[in-house]
Image (cartoon, rainbow, N blue to C red):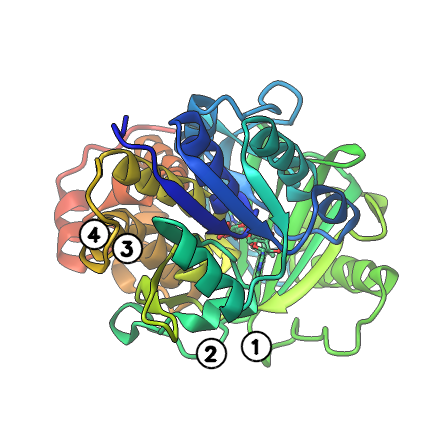
Amino acid sequence: MREVMAKIAIVGAGQAGLHLGIGLLLSGHQVTMLSNRTGEQIAAGTVISSQSMYGMALGLERELGIDYWQDSAPQYAGAQMRVADSDGNVMLFWQGAMDEPGQSIDQRVKMPVWIDRFIELGGDFRLVDAGIAELEELAGSHDLTVIASGKGEIGQLFTRNPDRSPFTQPQRVLALTYVNRFRPRPGIPAICININPGIGEFVSFPGLTLSGACEIFTIEAVPGGPMDVWDDVKTPEEHLKVSEHLLRTFFPLEAERIDGHLELTDDKAVLRGRITPTTKYPVATLPSGAQVFGLADVVCLNDPLTGQGSNNASKGAKIYLDAINARGDAPFDEAWMNAVFEEYWDYARYPVAYTNQTLGQPPEHMLRILKTAESDAGLAHLMANSFNDPKSIAPWYYDAAAAHEFLDGRTPVAA
Ligand SMILES: Cc1cc2nc3c(=O)[nH]c(=O)nc-3n(C[C@H](O)[C@H](O)[C@H](O)COP(=O)(O)OP(=O)(O)OC[C@H]3O[C@@H](n4cnc5c(N)ncnc54)[C@H](O)[C@@H]3O)c2cc1C
């Protein structure tokens, strides 16, 4: 616990900003939060994410007493990966159990409740779409200003770090949908990653939305490929129709789960977009010379393919919270911000590599690992748990020599 109370400003009431803000209030700090949307507006808006979260990150929410949906939201304690072509010929399939269950709570459900909790704890919540002038004002009146604005435009203040950003273009065209009439997968509930090589992926899991339990899926189309057909889609109904068509055409084994026809959970249950995975330098300097500190997506943005962004946001918020608490009365200067971000990057480099390795042409050692997981239940278990902690499969998942050494030394565990 910090001995000296600090005045902290946070821009953005999302997964990271609210987690940090609530944690700081519970630690006795004074917190101002700027949000460009009220809780009511978030609840009434379109879906934002599929936000699959796993044990470690959910545990951090539990630590703060904000895991309000632990008992009411569906849980899934498994992971499945299938590589198959459009005729359903399976090239690879593994499934494994996770040690702790994952959950997905619609951010339209979660963030309004967290905003209420932030206010209840005495946080100063202001409805402002922050621009440079507001940041200058915050930086002048607070000890530290944290920017947690996700994909918001204000994030352009931060500069891309080319050494940590292998891509300059989006690697997928994303289409997110919350549905009913999509039966649970056979067997234990799981995050299902389905890959149709060269065409894209279909990722699904159970979730909790405004109307209750549902299935959430994201179709990830390789740009220019046969699933990149979204340009003329305008309405939620068209989005749903195209999604079902793509599912039936390119993922026939998963399409067997459709019960008649898919239905949207509500008329705002769709989202489309493209993300260029990017890591930035964590400190931005305002015209006055004041410096602000980036957190989560604003400085470390990933494609959602492996479901890491919300988890990273929660883990990053925890690192920043502990670092602020440990700072005593020393200033939150640039050197401190860079050091704290490096501590975060020491973890985040793994989910970044994990996601980017899955987006790109899979290296030979990765294919060998995934193929081995088909018949080695112990390895499938490690891979299932890697969604929770991509660092847990380092170095071997990320390095060819380490992978071969690891696999050559393994005694497979029968499925
Ligand atoms: C299709 C899709 C599927 C996804 N699926 C998953 C998944 O399964 N698992 C997972 O872990 N992650 C997933 N993610 C990623 C995850 O949603 C994000 O990484 C996470 O929400 C990032 O948290 P954040 O706090 O950085 O930003 P956000 O949660 O986006 O919050 C930022 C907030 O700042 C506000 N804001 C922006 N600009 C301003 C401004 N100028 N002034 C005031 N407020 C501002 C925004 O309105 C927003 O409320 C997915 C993302 C997408 C797009």
Q: CA distance from mark 2 to mark 4?
A: 31 Å
- Judged left or right of residue 292, residue 212 is right
What residue is shown with label 2?
169
Label 4 residue SS: helix
Q: Which of the two discs, 3 and 1, labels the residue nearer the N terminus?
A: 1
Q: CA distance from mark 2 to mark 1?
A: 10 Å
Image quadrant where residue 324 sits: top left
Nearest to the eye among marks 2 and 4: give it.
4
Tell whether label 1 touches label 3 (CB within 8 Å).
no
Residue at left offset 57%, top offset 56%: 89
Q: Amino acid at mark 1?
A: Pro
Q: Which residue is mark 1?
A: 223
Q: Work out whether 130 lies above or below 111.
A: below
**Label 4: few (<14), some (14–19) or many (≥20) C-alpha neighbours in 10 Å:** some
Residue 277 drawn above or below residue 253: below
Task: Determine which of the numbered discs, if any, sits on residue 349 in the image.
Answer: 3
Mark 4: amino acid: Trp
In the visual, does 340 lie left or right of 259? Answer: left
Determine contact: label 2, label 1, CB under 8 Å: yes
Which residue matches tag 4?
A: 336
Query: In front: mark 3 or mark 1?
Result: 3
Query: Where's the C terminus, which quadrant?
Result: top left
Mark 2 crowd level (few <14, some 14–19, many ≥20, 10 Å Cα): few
Residue 50's x, y, as percent? 61, 47
Upstream in sequence: badge 2 or badge 4: 2
Instruction: Give the spatial CA distance, label 4 vs label 3.
Output: 19 Å
- Give how far across and how far down residue 413 sits, in percent: 29, 28
Q: CA distance from mark 1 to mark 4?
A: 40 Å
